[in-house]
Amino acid sequence: MGKSANVTPRNSVSADSEAQRQKMQMETVERTEDIQVDGDQSKFSAILNILRKLVGVADIIDMHLSLPSQLLDPIPNLEYWNYMESPEHFIAITESDDEIERMVAVLAWWFSKLLKHTGRVHKPFNSVLGERFFCHWDVPCSATSGSSDVSRREDTASSSITNVSVGTDETVDKLRVEYITEQVSHHPPVSAFTYRCSERGIEAVGIDHIKAKFTGLSATVAPGSESKGIFVTLKQRGNETYKCTHPTGSIVGWLRGTLKVQMIENSYIVCAKSGLAAVVEFKEERWFSKDKGNVSGKVFRYNESIFGDKIASWRLKDIPKTCEVVATFGGSWDQQVTVQRMKEPERLLIDMAALRIADKSVKPLEEQGDLESRRVWEPVASKMRQGKFAEASRTKRAIEENQRTLAAGRKERGEAFVPALFKPDYSASGRPELLDNAPINM
């Protein structure tokens, strides 16, 4: 016991070695800033070569990689990572007086937000600290989750920065869904968000924080420690709240040269007020598998006081027999998912192949503040669209260097960053609250 005071702990050596290894890996990656990319295949090879140098790193996101503009898509992170690909599904959650149907509607919206992952894999710009994004969608009052006027899916994510549409201030026959988000931390990269439709009294809030790891065969993207899920609240139904956790995504196809996103592991949705929960279980797909479905799940009643803190770890087989199953669902998350209530016919829950990403309304650049996403990144995006990637990379580096200067100044003055839109005490609950005087530029 007496010798322990003079002995260096074994794990401190390994920690120092790991820090040194990550530093060397980071320096190696940073030397790729001026890489030349010619076409999608060359872009793929460049990304793969960088990721190979990061095999074994616990969290690539935490390394704050600064990739050259050739390897990015011309869209800001806060704009890309939104959950309103189909806002009519969000509004439809409020419609039914049947609590089971409301849970089913939450599931339909939850699947709809995965639409961006059914097409090409995108890498948006990293957000700067304090960056914010505002937009809204105007949804016809007659629109429902089963609306027949949905169009063919389009891969609009990378081009949406150029498609600026301006909605009217007042609409008579439409419902407005607003999206408000702010980058509230840079180390780790964390953003807070709120979606709301005041006419229907529905709101969704949460924290976005992801972690990523590359194994050599796949890249796994999962919720980070700050992300507790999306909290959907129906104010007109006694603040009935649904906690919806995020799935884990696996980017596969590195050996084939054709990347796609697979959803893996489990997610869950719980509503303490109604005593209903859903477990969503994804099946890992195989290239040569003949399986027709990659997702299945159950909606069931549960006792919050007994099982409330246990559902997070449940797979479908773990649901106790004492929990009454009221509906089952399954299919392919990127194609069609069906649902069946007990003793009722099976019906379509959502047709992902028929959905298209809804057009958002954003103020023109000249009416945006200096920290609004499109205003921050348009100088880079415009050069990328012109194919001037060397200029785009220099502009991008200038933005990043300015952020380092601002961070150094705050550190020297002993000042902490204070969000402009959200109350700072969001971390514990994962449910950020907007400030009463938040400067929202809708």
Image (tube, rainbow, N blue to C red):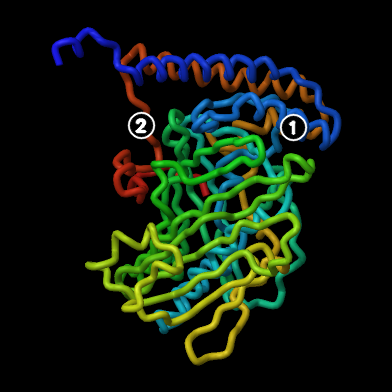
- Mark 2 element type: loop
- Mark 1 element type: helix
Residue 133 in the image: state x and y as whole percent. Answer: 54, 43
Residue 138 left/right relative to 154? left
Dot 1 or dot 2: first in sequence order is 1
Residue 70 sits in quarter: top right
Taking depth in this image into account, of 112 and 333 the one nearest to the observer is 333
Residue 403 sits above or below residue 83 on the image: above
Q: Residue drawn at (61%, 38%), measured in percent from left and top?
A: 76
Residue 373 in the image: state x and y as whole percent. Answer: 58, 37
Residue 211 in the image: state x and y as whole percent. Answer: 50, 39
Tag 2 residue: 418
Q: Residues within 10 Å of mark 1 (few under 14, many from 20)?
A: some
Residue 235 left/right relative to 24? left
Asked if marks 1 and 2 touch (Cβ < 8 Å), the reply is: no
Residue 18 sits above or below residue 111 on the image: above
Q: Residue drawn at (22%, 67%), measured in percent from left and top?
A: 305
Residue 24 in the image: state x and y as whole percent. Answer: 56, 14
Label disc, if present, on residue 382 of the rendered structure: 1
Q: Residue drawn at (68%, 26%), measured in percent from left and top?
A: 50
Mark 2 belongs to which amino acid?
Val
Residue 327 sits above or below residue 371 on the image: below
Marks 1 and 2, Cα distance to the nearest angstrom?
Answer: 30 Å
